[in-house]
Image: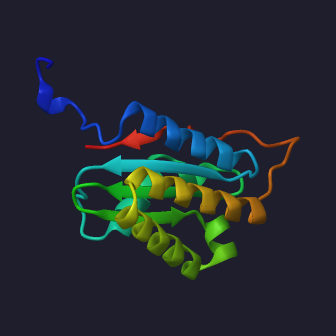
């Protein structure tokens, strides 16, 4: 225990679980020019999880991808909230109903298995959709955003 333990961010996942999520992101992004990020925090300081996801998306500068095809999965662990926020490029191609279905599927997975399995399923589904709408471009593709999980407070 450190001198100031109250500054330590909670550890919601084991090292193995974190590695599984990052690997799922890397696999999904190998076949698309799209980008996927995960943001996890304990409590949502706002009323609406989508507003929080939008704020984090902007804070992480995810709107700066070349094709505007980044997707953020936001999770507030203690509040049991989640949101998917897709930039305008991907949102315009798949529509609002797609995001509602993905959230519903993820909630179902959370209640049956583990949170990490639900995250992996969501990443895989989003990766497939990104692959179909923004395929990998061998000559120009680059990893525009880090693949690591971002942890808030």
Most distant residue in the bottom direction: 97
**Residue 105 pos. (x, y %):** 49, 71
From the viewer's perspective, is residue 115 above or below residue 141? below
**Residue 27 pos. (x, y %):** 67, 44
**Residue 9 pos. (x, y %):** 25, 35
Q: Is residue 54 visible?
A: yes
Quarter of the image where the N terminus is located: top left
- Front residue of 142/78: it is 78
**Residue 43 pos. (x, y %):** 22, 55
- Horizontal arrangement in the rendering, residue 50 relative to residue 119 (left or right): left
**How many numbered marks does the figure carry?**
0
- Front residue of 114/129: it is 114
From the viewer's perspective, is residue 6 above or below residue 44? above
Tell me which residue sits at (75%, 65%) in the image: 133
- Horizontal arrangement in the rendering, residue 43 relative to residue 65 (left or right): left
Tell me which residue sits at (46%, 49%) in the image: 38
- Horizontal arrangement in the rendering, residue 131 relative to residue 57 (left or right): right
Tell me which residue sits at (25%, 43%) in the image: 153
How was the colour assigned to the protein in this rendering? rainbow
Q: Is residue 145 visible?
A: no
Identify the image quadrant of residue 5. top left
- Horizontal arrangement in the rendering, residue 108 relative to residue 11 (left or right): right
Tell me which residue sits at (83%, 42%) in the image: 140
Most distant residue in the right direction: 139
């Amino acid at each position: 225990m450190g001198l100031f333990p109250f500054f330590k961010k909670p550890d919601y996942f084991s090292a193995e679980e974190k590695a599984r999520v990052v690997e799922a992101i890397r696999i999904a992004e190998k076949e698309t020019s799209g980008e996927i990020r995960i943001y996890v925090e304990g409590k949502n300081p706002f009323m609406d999880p989508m507003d929080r996801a939008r704020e984090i998306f902007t804070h992480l500068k995810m709107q700066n991808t070349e094709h505007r095809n980044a997707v953020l999965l936001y999770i507030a662990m203690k509040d049991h909230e989640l949101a998917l926020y897709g930039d305008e490029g991907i949102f315009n191609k798949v529509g609002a109903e797609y995001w509602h279905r993905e959230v519903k599927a993820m909630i179902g997975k959370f209640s049956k298995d583990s949170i990490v399995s639900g995250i992996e399923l969501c990443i895989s589904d989003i990766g497939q959709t990104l692959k179909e709408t923004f395929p990998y471009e061998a000559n120009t593709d680059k990893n525009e955003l880090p693949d690591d999980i971002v942890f808030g407070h």
